[in-house]
Amino acid sequence: MAEYPNRITDWPEEERPRERLLRHGPDALSEAELLAIILRVGAGKTTAVDLARRLISEFDGLRGLDAAPVASIRQIKGMGDAKACQVKAALELAKRFSQQKSNRQEVRVQNSGEVYHYLHLRLRDLSREVFQVLFLTTRHDIVADKILFEGSLTESVVSPREIITEALHHAAAALILVHNHPSGDPHPSIEDKKVTDKIIQACRPFDLAVLDHLIIGRDSYYSFADQGLIAAG
């Protein structure tokens, strides 16, 4: 098979990613071709498509690229600050768009699987631990969700008072606690259980029901409610 010239502009028009997208739509392009359009240009004798393929290979796919810090992406030859920022911005937009599709209508969560679906794209690949709370109506519609704490989950880090203040601000009737385990293993630690119990006890005088606490791992989750550790609300 003949090799393509080094510049995409020298390729046959029907093979150029941007022209193919205009003619056939984005569904017709590979991940590397879509990423090449975002990169716009390659580096030296490396085309944007070649550079995109290397990124996907180096980081084991788009998900790995999304999880990688900017500093690691910049180490790839041909990837400076501008290109690294373009890639990270595009991946973040994709995640936010996915979330907005759910938010076009009122979101109601009735079980742990729906909570996992709602949040896992945002939390599963984070390199740091974050603690997020979903604030719900009596019908379990989400009125707000907010990351309140960051860092390893301990009783000293998590403040029930701040959670209750946010709940009262949003006139919430119930809460679902969510945090991630960067290790990928969603099983709770002793500290996770202590923090959960502390929050439940603090919420009772305010008639705030803690319905569940989800821990999101790499490709799975752990639900305190499903495991019988929290009474059904």
Image (cartoon, rainbow, N blue to C red):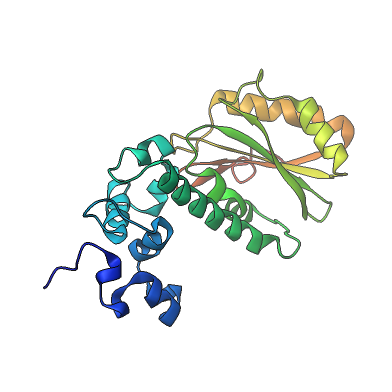
Q: Please tell me which residue lies in front, 217 or 46.
A: 46
At which x and y percent is residue 15? 29, 75
Q: Please tell me which residue lies in front, 59 or 136.
A: 59
Instruction: Tell me what residue is drawn at x 43 percent, y 34 percent.
Output: 183
At which x and y percent is residue 169? 87, 39
Q: Can residue 82 be seen in this view?
A: yes
Residue 100 versus residue 134 in the image, above or below: below
Residue lying furthest left in this view?
1
Number of marks in the rendered image: 0
Residue 193 versus residue 82 in the image, above or below: above
Q: Please tell me which residue lies in front, 37 or 163.
A: 37
Horizontally, is 156 left or right of 9 in the view? right
Horizontally, is 146 left or right of 13 in the view? right
Instruction: Tell me what residue is drawn at x 28 percent, y 57 percent.
Output: 53
Residue 61 versus residue 221 in the image, above or below: below
At which x and y percent is residue 172? 84, 44
The quarter in which the N terminus is drawn is: bottom left
Residue lying furthest top in this view?
156
Horizontally, is 51 left or right of 118 in the view? left
Q: Can residue 233 be seen in this view?
A: no
Instruction: Tell me what residue is drawn at x 50 percent, y 54 percent.
Output: 90
At which x and y percent is residue 137? 83, 51
